[in-house]
């Protein structure tokens, strides 16, 4: 066996030397045939990988020379078939010889600069136009992944290097632009392996400038991958992308990442909205809450900031500063309709759903362990920069939404007789407003459950009539009525002042046969 092994090393070194000699450049088929045969044997035998990597003559100098040759290929172009064949064979051999063998990984790490130069070639715009180049790109990424996977020292060195590369050489960002889903999948396997169980590497990804650029590119890519058919490489790539962000959430890096995605002068950036979608999905599938403590201040700040912005935008739309007292109050003719309002409300729905999920998890935990931290208190006691507390923020936004956005009943808007305003179809049909009223009402019900202080805050800011007015059918807000009834129940639970408030409210209108609210003569809507 030792003799056979020695002959295998000799054979590898001789075929490489012959190929690299001045007269051997035309022996590509011979080289690739030998490399592919050895690579197949290496894939099947871990013992062979160990022996071939450790015995003499050493293969590592010859492998380094092969990669240097590929990096300096005379006619380097992704469309050169000869180069593609060479890259595939050399990368496959490298991938297989290092798999799971730490010493081999250490010896092979020296080829990384040359391998990176090859990947720079195959991650160019012109290379992405050549579909035949995709297998070479994918194999090179897999080789790089196997060189560092499970090797802490090499992984840290690679990660710190790749996250500080100049923008034009940022290989991870360039590869994320590949149209080949298999390449994206291989790259994401590498990235997930790099940040797994490493606080330092996760921190670098979320806090550094290079890491933020990578996250922005990845979020854009995940939006495109979202509609990939199940079980396809695109769907698998999306799952790995989600897995990467889940690692960041597990480590408590959601606040840092959200902050790094901000855009100066914008209340919410598109990438922040995408991140909130991933965070919402992560929380909805979560069964524990201790890891979510770090998210609470961030979510409170997001909620209050977006709520304040939305309130101001709606106020400008309903009451334009320069409007005349007798002018037409139809929103159709207003000049102050904020085009960013739907985006703000879309993100607000996501933030609200995250807060509700964490609050419910916290309440369940405290049921089993009364000494557990009450996370709902963080949301209840939060206040915006202008001093508006959570209760006031929710109720004021609900009140404004009720005036600005009529409910939909049997496909038609139902106008509030107190405002009698019409709304343009472009706003009425905006997706950003869907579920907003329902989730805000649900949030009230969750936060006031068995908490008299918050129940009282809702009453003091005039919230009880607002919640009562939400006990209606609205096709834009499925189950709004049911959530409003539950919220009202929680508001009245063991709270005599709130019960008296409800008892003092008399019906001020009635629903006609078409489902329209009509004001009673002599009565005033609250």
Image (cartoon, rainbow, N blue to C red):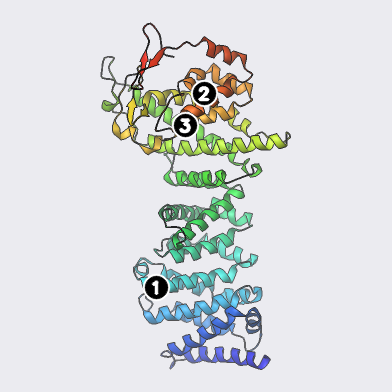
Q: CA distance from mark 1 to mark 2?
A: 59 Å
The percent position of residue 338, horizontal first and vertical second, equals 35, 33
Q: Looking at the image, tell me whether mark 3 or mark 1 is earlier in sequence order.
A: 1
Q: Looking at the image, tell me whether mark 1 or mark 2 is earlier in sequence order.
A: 1
Residue for badge 2: 392
| 178 or 506, nearer to the observer | 506
Q: Nearer the viewer, mark 3 or mark 1?
A: 3
Q: CA distance from mark 3 to mark 1?
A: 52 Å
Mark drawn on residue 133: 1
Tag 1 near tag 2, CB within 8 Å:
no
Among the 4 quarters of the image, the one containing residue 357: top right
Among the 4 quarters of the image, the one containing residue 61: bottom right
Residue for badge 3: 479
The percent position of residue 108, horizontal first and vertical second, equals 58, 76
Q: CA distance from mark 3 to mark 2?
A: 23 Å
Residue at point 31% right, 27% down?
A: 423
Residue at point 57% right, 20% down?
A: 457
Quadrant of the image containing the C terminus? top left
Category of crowding for the residue at label 3, using alpha-carbon neighbours closer than 10 angstroms: few (below 14), some (14–19), many (at least 20): some
Tag 3 near tag 2, CB within 8 Å:
no
């Amino acid at each position: 066996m030792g003799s056979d092994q020695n002959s295998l090393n000799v054979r590898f070194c001789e075929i490489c030397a012959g190929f690299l000699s001045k007269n051997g450049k035309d022996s590509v088929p011979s080289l690739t045939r030998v490399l592919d045969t050895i690579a197949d044997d290496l894939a099947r035998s871990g013992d062979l990988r160990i022996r071939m990597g450790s015995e003499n003559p050493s293969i590592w100098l010859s492998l380094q020379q092969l990669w240097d040759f590929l990096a300096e290929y005379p006619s380097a172009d992704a469309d050169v078939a000869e180069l593609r064949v060479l890259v595939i064979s050399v990368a496959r051999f490298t991938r297989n010889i290092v798999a799971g063998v730490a010493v081999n990984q250490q010896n092979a790490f020296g080829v990384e600069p040359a391998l990176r130069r090859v990947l720079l070639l195959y991650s160019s715009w012109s290379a992405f136009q050549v579909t035949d180049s995709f297998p070479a790109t994918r194999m090179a990424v897999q080789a790089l992944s196997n060189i560092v996977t499970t090797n802490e020292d090499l992984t840290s060195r690679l990660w710190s290097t790749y996250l500080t590369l100049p923008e034009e050489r940022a290989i991870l960002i360039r590869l994320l632009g590949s149209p080949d889903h298999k390449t994206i999948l291989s790259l994401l396997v590498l990235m997930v392996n790099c940040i797994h169980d490493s606080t330092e590497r996760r921190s670098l990804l979320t806090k550094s400038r290079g890491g933020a650029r990578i996250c922005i590119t990845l979020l854009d890519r995940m939006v495109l991958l979202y509609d990939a058919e199940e079980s396809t490489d695109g769907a698998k790539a999306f799952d790995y992308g989600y897995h990467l962000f889940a690692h960041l959430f597990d480590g408590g890096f959601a606040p840092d990442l959200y902050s790094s995605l901000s855009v100066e002068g914008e209340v919410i950036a598109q990438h922040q909205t995408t991140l909130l979608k991933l965070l919402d999905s992560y929380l909805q599938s979560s069964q524990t809450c201790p890891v979510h403590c770090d998210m609470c201040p961030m979510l409170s700040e997001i909620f209050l900031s977006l709520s304040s912005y939305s309130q101001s935008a709606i106020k400008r739309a309903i009451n334009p500063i320069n409007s005349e007292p007798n002018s037409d109050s139809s929103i159709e003719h207003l000049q102050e309709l904020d085009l960013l309002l739907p985006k703000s409300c879309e993100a607000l729905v996501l933030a609200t759903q995250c807060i509700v999920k964490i609050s419910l998890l916290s309440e369940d935990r405290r049921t089993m362990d009364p000494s557990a931290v009450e996370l709902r208190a963080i949301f209840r006691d939060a206040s915006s920069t202008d001093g508006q507390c959570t209760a006031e923020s929710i109720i004021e936004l609900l009140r404004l939404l009720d005036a600005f956005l009529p409910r939909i009943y049997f496909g038609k808007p139902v106008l509030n007789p107190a405002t009698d305003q019409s709304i343009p179809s472009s706003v009425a049909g905006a997706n950003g407003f869907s579920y907003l009223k329902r989730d805000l009402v649900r949030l009230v019900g969750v936060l006031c459950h068995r908490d008299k202080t918050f129940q009282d805050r809702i009453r003091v800011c005039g919230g009880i009539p607002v919640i009562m007015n939400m006990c209606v059918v609205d096709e834009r807000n499925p189950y709004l009525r049911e959530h409003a009834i539950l919220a009202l129940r929680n508001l009245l639970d063991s709270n005599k002042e709130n019960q008296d408030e409800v008892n003092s409210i008399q019906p001020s209108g009635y629903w006609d046969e078409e489902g329209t609210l009509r004001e009673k003569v002599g009565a005033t809507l609250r």
